[in-house]
Amino acid sequence: MTADVIRFEHLAWTFGSGTLDAQLALQDASLCVRQGEVSALIGPSGAGKSTLVAFANGLHRPRRTGQALVLGCDTGDPAADLGALRARVGLVLQYPQLQLFERFVGDDVAYGPRQLGLSRPELRSRVLNAMSLVGLGEEYVDRRTFSLSGGEMRRVALAGVLAMQPEVLVLDEATAGLDPAGRQKIHELIRTLRANGTTILMVSNDLDQVAELADSVTILSQGRTVASGPVRTVLADREMLLAAGLAPTHAAAVAEEISAHGVSLPGDVLTASDLEEALWQKLRR
Ligand SMILES: Nc1ncnc2c1ncn2[C@@H]1O[C@H](COP(=O)(O)OP(=O)(O)O)[C@@H](O)[C@H]1O
Ligand SMILES: [Mg+2]
């Protein structure tokens, strides 16, 4: 049996609750991530994705409604040990500036593992390893954190989380603002971590990326979960995607365009390699 690493049920969240400018962000959001899988959370801007993933390490905790269970920890329980949870669940925020605070990159990446009582050489190798995983060479150690570009800061924030070697990694739009090479690097990283047994929850606005990388997907629209399940099933439901304010993947759109011009292709084309395969099948006949 594969255990649920994250189980959110019927969560709700209002920012500035009880004030004049209260903002309802989540109304009925549920999500499940199983041990060892890559799960994606998608939805249009403002759907509540960032609000929801903040429940993964107790940054937000259930108030009156719903339940958040993460690695067996019920974060709604006032006695929950959030410190222990945060050492096991790494959350990379959508806006990395909010996560960085040390003047030099090396110190920022070392901040978490420094609390673990490692020897100096162990600490140094953890930091350099984590940096190299995100494509930051040793020369970045002494760079000033806040002089970096947005994409570089994003990678520093990610390295800081990876240096903790978390069992669960939550990435909130980790590839936003990166160039294609940087994006590719993150894709490889996600695949490597998955192969090593890390459970991953990734927020993304890029359905092509999700089709390539994720096993399962949850769709959030206006604070509600509107679909969830295996990627192939959920992303094949065009009407639901459109109703949720999302567009099908590029390959699915191209396949539909080709079919509309009289060359019928299977309806389950999702990725570029699916499309390539479907076209080869046609040409061979
Ligand atoms: N700190 C905040 N204070 C008030 N409202 C917020 C705050 N953060 C997010 N919101 C609002 O909550 C809703 C959901 O936001 P968010 O979770 O960031 O969506 P997403 O990540 O899907 O784009 C939006 O309407 C947003 O304006
Ligand atoms: Mg967001």
Image (cartoon, rainbow, N blue to C red):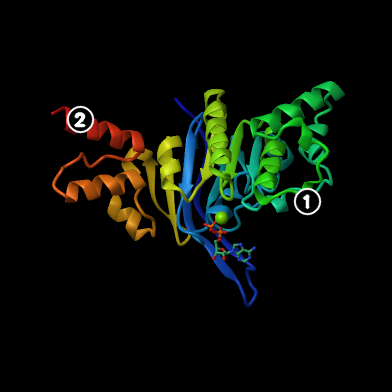
Residue 69, x across and y down, in percent? 57, 41
Q: How far apart are marks 1 and 2 (CA)?
A: 52 Å
| Dot 1 or dot 2, earlier in sequence | 1
Q: In the rendered view, does 207 fall on the left or right side of 98?
A: left
Q: Residue at x 46, y 58 (%)?
A: 44
Asked if residue 161 shows in the view, the reply is yes
* Amino acid tagged 2: Gln
* Quadrant hosting ligand 2: bottom right
Label of residue 146 in the image: 1
Q: In the rendered view, does 278 fall on the left or right side of 87?
A: left
Question: Which residue appears farthest toward the front when viewing the image?
Answer: 283
Residue 267, x across and y down, in percent? 22, 42
- Tell me the quarter of the image containing the C terminus: top left
- Tell me the quarter of the image containing the N terminus: top left
* Amino acid tagged 1: Phe
Q: In the rendered view, does 193 fall on the left or right side of 80?
A: left
Asked if residue 119 shows in the view, the reply is no
Q: Which residue is drawn at 83% across and 43% down?
A: 104
- Label 1 SS: helix
- Label 2 SS: helix
- The residue carrying pointer 2 sits among few (fewer than 14), some (14 to 19) or many (20 or more) residues within 10 Å by Cα, namely few
Residue 210, x across and y down, in percent? 44, 42
Residue 240, x across and y down, in percent? 32, 54
Label of residue 281 in the image: 2
Q: In the rendered view, does 206 fall on the left or right side of 274?
A: right
Question: Which residue appears farthest toward the bottom when viewing the image?
Answer: 20
